Image (tube, rainbow, N blue to C red):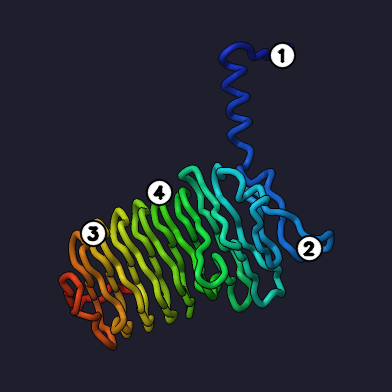
């Protein structure tokens, strides 16, 4: 005879906790965007952006604090690109996940726009502000502020990616952490981060950026053929600019902390 097993009291509560925690955090996530067949679908925390989208102040992802990821970008399989425009809004997290995580940006890569010219959209308070783990996922990031994130402001694998008018400040890790080939930083500023201002493992990148008052070094570059002629750093805790490898043009000396060159290059 087989006896039925009953569970009660603390054991029952423990089993219920196991069931609840086993449900994926994205189980309630939905597709959102401006160009869906049924019309515009507002984005909420954890949603997947599947068409071009411009956030409004009334969107749930703007009006609330996200428990894990803010938004996930996944373009259609045949899409050339996809654009997420924060419309000058802020999306906020509770210290976990990514503010914007790019899974697939189309064959040409995603464009992430913070605001119209002269303003910034903001990603704040997540684990990492902006994240993409493959080089063809992000083509352009512009007019975006990444602040108060638990780790990096942005952690990106790049391939010809342009970051323009991007500000990383008050993140506990590095302001910007980039790996890959090609690309440009234009009018980028990284300040008062808990580790390094800008950390690059790159080849052939042009760096027009300033790093100020970061706890460790301002700009660290590992790689070859990076152009640092328009890079500068000051008032950082360690080196202003540290180059390990080779560069086509050295960083500006005027107004910078110590600039240190090393012949060592970290393998790709």
Of labels 1 and 4, earlier in sequence is 1
Of labels 1 and 3, earlier in sequence is 1
Camera sees residue 79: yes
Front label number (1 vs 2)? 2
Of labels 3 and 2, earlier in sequence is 2
* Residue closer to the observer: 150 or 55: 55
Question: Quadrant of residue 258 in the image?
Answer: bottom left
User: Which label was assigned to residue 36?
Assistant: 2
Whether tag 1 and tag 2 are in contact, CB under 8 A, the answer is: no
Classify mark 4: residues with Cα within 10 Å, few (<14), some (14-19) or many (20+): many
Whether tag 2 and tag 4 are in contact, CB under 8 A, the answer is: no
C-alpha distance separating marks 1 and 2: 50 Å
Does residue 121 appear to the left or right of 219 in the view shown?
A: right
Classify mark 1: residues with Cα within 10 Å, few (<14), some (14-19) or many (20+): few
The image shows residue 3, relative to residue 253, as above or below, that is above
* Residue closer to the observer: 35 or 213: 213
Q: Mark 1 points at which residue?
A: 4
Does residue 10 appear to the left or right of 33 in the view shown?
A: left
Of labels 2 and 4, earlier in sequence is 2
Residue at the spot 46% in from the left edge and 48% down from the top edge:
125
C-alpha distance separating marks 3 and 4: 16 Å
Residue at the spot 71% in from the left edge and 66% down from the top edge:
51
Q: What element carries label 3?
A: loop
Image location (x, y in percent) of residue 153: 42, 58
Q: Name the residue under label 4.
A: 150
Classify mark 2: residues with Cα within 10 Å, few (<14), some (14-19) or many (20+): some
User: Which label was assigned to residue 168?
Assistant: none
Question: Quadrant of residue 186 in the image?
Answer: bottom left
Q: Is mark 1 on a helix, strand or loop?
A: loop
User: Which label was assigned to residue 216?
Assistant: 3
Whether tag 1 and tag 4 are in contact, CB under 8 A, the answer is: no
Quadrant containing the N terminus in the rendered view: top right
């Amino acid at each position: 005879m087989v006896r039925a097993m009953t569970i009660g009291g603390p054991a029952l509560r423990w089993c219920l906790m196991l069931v609840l925690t086993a449900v994926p955090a994205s189980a309630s996530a939905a597709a959102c965007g401006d160009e869906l067949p049924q019309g515009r679908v507002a984005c909420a925390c954890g949603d997947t952006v599947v068409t071009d989208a411009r956030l409004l102040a009334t969107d749930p992802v703007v009006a609330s604090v996200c428990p894990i990821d803010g938004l996930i970008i996944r373009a259609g399989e045949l899409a050339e690109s996809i654009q997420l425009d924060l419309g000058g809004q802020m999306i906020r997290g509770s210290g976990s996940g990514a503010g914007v995580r790019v899974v697939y940006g189309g064959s040409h890569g995603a464009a992430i726009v913070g605001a119209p010219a002269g303003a910034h959209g903001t990603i704040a308070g997540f684990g990492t502000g902006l994240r993409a783990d493959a080089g063809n996922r992000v083509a352009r990031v512009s007019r975006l502020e990444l602040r108060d994130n638990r780790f990096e402001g942005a952690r990106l694998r790049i391939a010809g990616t342009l970051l323009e008018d991007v500000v990383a400040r008050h993140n506990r890790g590095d302001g910007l952490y980039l790996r890959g080939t090609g690309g440009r930083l234009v009018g980028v500023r990284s300040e008062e981060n808990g580790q390094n201002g800008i950390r690059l493992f790159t080849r052939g990148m042009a760096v027009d950026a300033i790093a100020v008052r970061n706890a460790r070094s301002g700009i660290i570059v590992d790689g070859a053929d990076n152009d640092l002629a328009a890079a500068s750093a000051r008032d950082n805790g360690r080196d202003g600019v540290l180059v390990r490898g080779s560069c086509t043009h050295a960083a500006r000396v005027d107004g910078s902390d110590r600039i240190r060159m090393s012949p060592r290059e970290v393998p790709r």
